[in-house]
Amino acid sequence: VQLQASGGGLVQAGGSLRLSCTTSGTISISTINAVGWYRQAPGKQREFVARIRRGGLTYADSVKGRFTISRDTANRSVNLQMNNLKPEDTGVYYCHVNPSGTDYFGQGTQVTVSS
C-alpha cells in the first residue's frame, strides 16, 4: 500500500492546517477500515496522533479537542484537521494503515508551528 500525505507547512501558534492522506495504486483508502496519523518530532520517537475506523475515532490526549480526523469519501482521502496548533505539534506527520497485520506509513509531511 502506497500512502501519500500532504498539507503540511509553516504556521504560527494558534493557526490551523489540514492534512490529507491518499493512496496510490489499486487500493483505495476508502476500502481500508482503520487509518491513522502519527508524528515524529526531531530527536523523538514516532507517536500516535489519531485514528479513524468503522467503530469510531481515537485521539492522543495531547490533541483532543484540537484535531479532528475524518474521511472524505468523494476525494478518497482521510484528513486531519488541526486547529489551535502549538509549537509542540511540530514534526513530520505520517498516515498509517495496517491491513492484514503489516504496517504501512506514508512519506510524511512536515508541520512546523512557530511560537
Image (spheres, grey):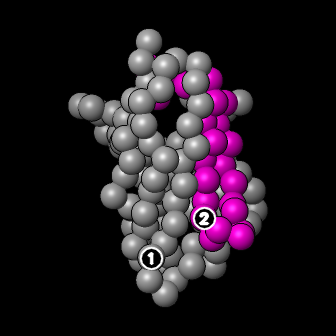
State the residue lying farthest toward the top.
Answer: 115
Tell whether 76 sits left or right of 113: right
Residue at image position (39%, 73%) is: 2
Q: Nearer the viewer, residue 33 or 69?
A: 69
C-alpha separation, residue under disc 2 versus residue under disc 1: 11 Å
Name the residue tied to disc 1: 24
Q: Nearer the viewer, residue 99 or 39?
A: 39
State the residue lying farthest toward the right.
Answer: 55
Extent of the magenta region: 66-90
Q: Position of residue 26 (x, y in %)?
A: 49, 87
Q: Say which element carries label 1.
A: strand
Q: Quadrant of residue 36?
A: bottom right
Residue type at numbered disc 2: Ser
Name the residue tied to disc 2: 77
Residue at image position (53%, 42%) is: 49
Q: Nearer the viewer, residue 9 or 22?
A: 9
Q: Position of residue 13 (x, y in %)?
A: 52, 18
Mark on residue 1? none
Residues tagged 2 and 1 counted as in contact (Cβ below 8 A): no
Q: Residues within 10 Å of mark 1 (few under 14, many from 20)?
A: few
Residue at image position (37%, 41%) is: 110
N-terminal-most mark, 2 or 1: 1
Tell whether 98 sits left or right of 41: right
Residue type at numbered disc 1: Ser
Question: Which quarter shows the C terminus?
Answer: top left
Question: Which quarter shows the N terminus?
Answer: bottom left
Q: Nearer the viewer, residue 8 or 40?
A: 8
Q: Position of residue 67 (x, y in %)?
A: 64, 37
